[in-house]
Amino acid sequence: MSPRVVAIIPARMGSSRFAGKVLAVHEDRPLLYHVWRCVCRCRTVDRVMIATDSAKIATVATDFGAEVVRTSKRPRTGSDRVAEAIRKRSASIVINVQADCFGLPPKTIDRVVDAMTEDQTIKYATLARRIESDQDLFDPGVVKVVTDREGRALWFSRFPLPYLQQAAAGSRNSQFRFRGHIGVYFFRRRALEDFARWKQTLLEKAESLEQLRVLEHGGIMQVFNTSARTFSIDTPEDMKKIVKVYK
């Protein structure tokens, strides 16, 4: 029997560098619409919802046809908001797609869901791509990830991982295949409930990376590689990045 898969996009108005960015307009549509549209195209996803505590976001999302779940202001992270949104709804696999993750092909999400359907031992999963420039490598907004030989996450950081002790002159990126994390999380239903029940951890707070809560509690997060080029919008200037994706 196929799992019931629900994808939830947590959206909020607050952003330290670009307040209300999910409602910024590109091609006459809010950015949130473009992310929602991509997720709706996934073959394996049965239901797509937007979870928000903002009346303004809820109105905009409803107007473009999305199913909206109003949440409280209590959630500490996007995944906590997703856990609150799914609490009284059925799902066996829950996907948290961050609202500022642009350019992700639906087939990439489908590939991970297919893998989780086949391998029931995968409780947590996420995505990563190769970092292509030293600028991204040293950008704290680009989260770095390292894995073991089986693709299981060892650590995430805003600092370059690993640190090249014997780095030669020139580009660091040409000396090691650094990988950057993509803001999509896949959870088994029970695993998400565990995540939401756990207290925030010290290293999660230090890096401001919610996925570290899983690792600090001994969870295993499978990392799937993708060549997809995604964009995170953190400042108004970043809007230029998505022109090549959403035309």
Image (cartoon, rainbow, N blue to C red):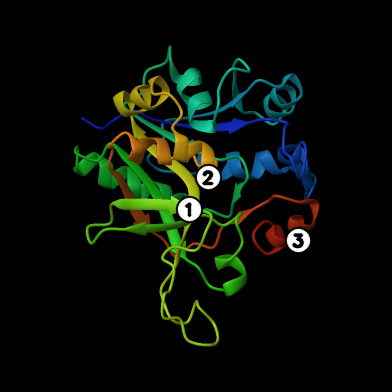
Q: Which of marks 2 and 3 is in front?
A: 2
Residues 138 and 182: in front is 138
| Residue type pointed to by label 3 | Lys
Q: Residue at x 46, y 28 (%)?
A: 200
Which comes before the other along the chain, label 2 or label 3? 2
Q: Residue at x 47, y 44 (%)?
A: 184
Q: Which amino acid does label 1 sit on?
A: Ser
Which quadrant is home to the N terminus?
Answer: top left
Amino acid type at mark 2: Glu
Whether residue 36 is visible here, answered yes or no, is: yes
Foreground: 165 or 89? 165
Q: Which mark is residue 157?
A: 1
**Cβ–Cβ below 8 Å for labels 2 and 3?**
no
- Left or right, 168 with respect to 36, comes to left
Vertical arrangement, residue 229 with respect to residue 123, above or below = below
Query: What's the residue at 72%, 32% (across, down)?
Result: 14
Of the pair 92 and 150, the residue shown nearer to us? 150
Q: Do the residues labelled 1 and 2 touch (CB within 8 Å)?
A: yes
Q: How far apart are marks 2 and 3 (CA)?
A: 27 Å
Asked if residue 107 shows in the view, the reply is: no
How busy is the neighbourhood of tag 1: few (under 14 within 10 Å), some, or many (20 plus)? many
Q: Where is residue 174 in the image (x, y as percent from the top left)?
A: 47, 82
User: Residue at label 2?
Assistant: 207
Which SS class for mark 2? Answer: helix
